[in-house]
Amino acid sequence: MFFYPTISRAKRLHIICLSNGGYDGLGEQREKELQRAARRLGASATCVNNAALQDGPHAWDPSVVAANVGPWLHAGAVVVTFDRYGASGHANHVAVYHGAAPASFARRGDGVTRDARRHCRFYALETAPHYRRYIGAFDVLCAAVRARFDPRPSVLVASLDVRGCYAALAAHASQLVWFRRLFVVFSAYTYANRLVVID
């Protein structure tokens, strides 16, 4: 939902989902749906099933996130994750930023992650301020203005393909509740992703 513009533009993409979304008991079904959605997007996907990374309102340990992301990193990889605000403020999303940021791998100290830190590029999806979150396609302009005046290096990825976003979400049928249908149409994240470089 949050990364559609970026995913739709990627040439080769592997999605790593750190939870099967089983908070309400639908984990196995959602793993299958993730695979369907990824195929629809022309991507591959892996769902990590770790007891310490279960869906819910509690924050994950960033070192566990890093341990599960690290093995996927290789020279030339581009990692796109949430920023420190997690796009929606969800505790799991915030923990993903703290675990997937390059500094997490430096702290772990194993050779694979040191190399990954040197040879990968890391980006964080900038969380849109509340007043911009549901202005739909107008956010492309707002994000462009913000990027112009913010000195941090970033990439702005835009998409007007609401149908493609909806089709991917429809493949994730258990997630397709009424408010997510509205989210696809009105969310700033459907139309613009500003990806800020993480050092």
Image: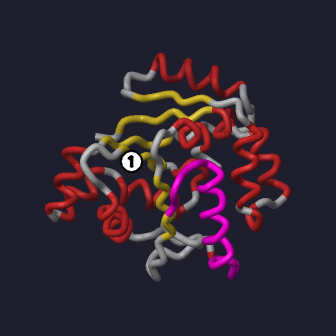
Stretch of the chain drawn in magenta: 23-45
Could you tell me which residue is drawn at 45 percent across and 70 percent down? Answer: 60
The residue singled out by tag 1 in the image is 79
* 47 with respect to 77 (left or right): right
Could you tell me which residue is drawn at 56 percent across and 21 percent down? Answer: 144
* Quadrant where the image shows the C terminus: top left
Query: Residue 140 in the image: x percent, y percent?
Result: 64, 25
Whether 30 is among the magenta residues is yes
In this view, 67 is above or below 27: above
Query: Residue 64 in the image: x percent, y percent?
Result: 35, 71
Q: Quadrant of residue 163?
A: top right
Q: Nearer the viewer, residue 20 or 42?
A: 42
Could you tell me which residue is drawn at 67 percent across and 66 percent down? Answer: 33
- Label 1 crowding class (10 Å Cα cut-off): few <14, some 14-19, many 20+? some
In this view, 121 is above or below 50: above
Q: Main secondary structure of the magenta part?
A: helix
Query: Residue 154 in the image: x percent, y percent?
Result: 42, 29
Question: Which amino acid, by three-letter code, is at mark 1?
Answer: Val
Q: Nearer the viewer, residue 26 or 109?
A: 26
